[in-house]
Image: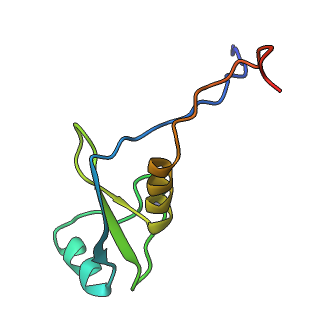
Amino acid sequence: MRLTREVPAHVETLELRWLSRDFLVMSPAVRRTREKHKMAAITCQWCGHAFADGEMVALAAIPMAINATLCQACCASAEAADAAPLQQPTDGGPDEA
Ligand SMILES: [Zn+2]
């Protein structure tokens, strides 16, 4: 037996306390060190991007969580969100054009 229904899409938001855009350059040495300490490979913790050698890894502080590695595209999105005013949800009322 199974019940299925569509649910509305939702928006997930991650607040960052600070962001270090140029935290680490991905390299074979970084990979070896992480493997030696049995640590998982570094990926962007927001979009899942796998870093290539020579690519810059950013670090962000997240309240009540450990720091997160981010790719440059996600950094740009976070910085653009700071520059833009917060969007309020609209209900499509009579004032809407
Ligand atoms: Zn990303």
Q: Which residue is located at x 40 percent, y 63 percent? A: 43
Residue 26 position, x and y percent, is 34, 79
- Nearer to me, 78 or 85: 85
Q: Which corner quadrant of the image does residue 36 belong to? A: bottom left
Q: Residue furthest left?
A: 37
Q: Is residue 68 visible?
A: yes
Tally the marks: 0
- The N terminus - image quarter: top right
- Nearer to me, 12 or 83: 83
Horizontally, is 40 left or right of 44 in the view?
Answer: left
Q: How is the image coloured?
A: rainbow
Q: Is residue 41 visible?
A: no
Q: Which residue is located at x 57 percent, y 34 percent? A: 87
- The C terminus - image quarter: top right
Residue 24 position, x and y percent, is 28, 75
Horizontally, is 59 left or right of 83 in the view?
Answer: left
Vertical arrangement, residue 58 with respect to residue 95, above or below: below
Vertical arrangement, residue 25 with respect to residue 57, above or below: below
Q: Residue furthest right?
A: 97
Residue 63 position, x and y percent, is 24, 39
Residue 41 position, x and y percent, is 34, 67
Vertical arrangement, residue 95 with respect to residue 17, above or below: above
Q: Which residue is located at x 21 percent, y 66 percent? A: 38
- Nearer to me, 25 or 42: 25
Q: Which corner quadrant of the image does residue 65 belong to? A: top left
